[in-house]
Amino acid sequence: MAETLKKGSRVTGAAREKLAADLKKKYDSGASIRALAEETGRSYGFVHRMLSESGVTLRGRGGATRGKKAATA
């Protein structure tokens, strides 16, 4: 699907729904927003918005976290 979209072109109607469903499926199976953005040639913000519109519960940020460390007993 992503190959048929020109960079910066407006995505509407059935094509938008198809892209949203495709992104949702890949995100739910573990792909990051950045990876999806690179794969589709769209911006991080575009992919984030498409996922939000399709009702995905976005994951928290990865990497080092601040705060209390887990107790190691």
Image (tube, rainbow, N blue to C red):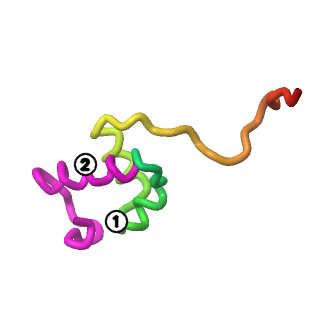
Residue 2 horizontal/vertical position (percent): 26, 66
- Residue 38 drawn above or below residue 46: below
Residue pictured at 36% horizontal, 37% vertical: 56
Residue pictured at 27% horizontal, 54% vertical: 22
- Determine the residue located farthest toward the front in the rendered image: 73
Q: Which mark is residue 51?
A: none
Q: Which residue is mark 1?
A: 40
Mark 1 touches mark 2? (CB < 8 Å): no
> Magenta span covers which residues?
1-27
Secondary structure found at label 1: helix
Callout 1: 10 Å neighbours few (<14), some, many (20+)?
A: some
Q: Exactly how many numbered labels are in the figure?
A: 2
Q: Decide which of 9, 53 is in the foreground and name it.
A: 53
28 is within the stretch colored magenta: no
Comparing labels 1 and 2, the label whose residue is closer to the camera: 2
- Determine the residue located farthest toward the right in the rendered image: 73
Residue 52 picture quarter: top left
Main SS of residues in magenta: helix
- Determine the residue located farthest toward the left in the rendered image: 14
**Amino acid bearing label 1:** Thr
66 on left or right of 22: right
- Residue 24 drawn above or below residue 44: above
Residue 39 horizontal/vertical position (percent): 39, 67
Q: Which residue is mark 2?
A: 21
